[in-house]
Image: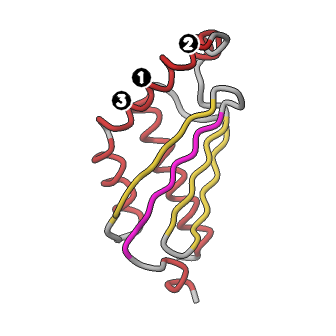
């Protein structure tokens, strides 16, 4: 497979993860592989009720806390989905949510330079 095909498959896996464990998938998702990093940007992933909560500081804190806990509890499943797409050991997964822009960023560090596979 090409780099673009792998990136698309990872996007599909993350969308599946978001639907199954976070309640809904993003409106848009982009995945980029850069050396030993997989960078995933999800746009439009907040539900209407979360968007309403995000209008207050307490609501923002609550969304971030709940989303973080859900993500951490399902991390192993996400790792499994990524490994099914590209057979690689995952070193770490980082995630952050912006309630202002409705974006979520996931950064996955792996134990090899994935771009070399596509040379």
Callout 3 crowding tier (Cα within 10 Å): few <14, some 14–19, many ≥20: few
Image height of 60 relative to 105, above or below: above
* x then y, percent, for residue 93: 41, 53
Q: Earlier in the sequence, mark 2 or mark 1?
A: 2
The residue carrying mark 2 is 59
Q: Which of 63 and 47 is in front in this view?
A: 63
The residue carrying mark 3 is 69
Q: Which of marks 3 and 2 is nearer the N terminus?
A: 2
Callout 2 crowding tier (Cα within 10 Å): few <14, some 14–19, many ≥20: some
Which residue shows up at 50% across the image and 55% down it?
A: 107
- Distance, label 3 to label 2, CA atoms, is 15 Å
Residue placed furthest toward the right: 101
**Would residue 53 be counted in the magenta stretch?**
no
Q: Mark 1–mark 3 contact, CB under 8 Å? A: yes
Callout 1 crowding tier (Cα within 10 Å): few <14, some 14–19, many ≥20: few
Q: How many marks?
A: 3
Q: Residue 31 carries which label?
A: none
* x then y, percent, for residue 31: 60, 57
Q: Which of 56 and 38 is in front in this view?
A: 56
Image height of 118 relative to 55, above or below: below
Which residue shows up at 28% across the image and 47% down it?
A: 76
User: In the image, is 74 to the left or to the right of 64?
Assistant: left
């Amino acid at each position: 497979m090409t780099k673009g095909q792998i990136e698309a498959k990872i996007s599909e896996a993350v969308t599946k993860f978001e639907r199954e464990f976070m309640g809904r998938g993003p409106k848009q998702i982009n995945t980029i592989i850069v050396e030993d990093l997989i960078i995933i940007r999800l746009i439009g992933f907040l539900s209407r009720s979360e968007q309403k909560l995000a209008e207050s500081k307490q609501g923002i804190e609550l969304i971030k806390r709940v989303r973080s806990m859900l993500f951490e509890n399902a991390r192993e499943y996400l790792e499994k989905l990524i490994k099914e797409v590209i057979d690689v050991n995952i070193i770490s997964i980082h995630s952050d949510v912006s309630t202002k822009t409705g974006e979520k960023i996931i950064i996955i560090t792996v134990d090899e330079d994935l771009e070399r596979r596509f040379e």
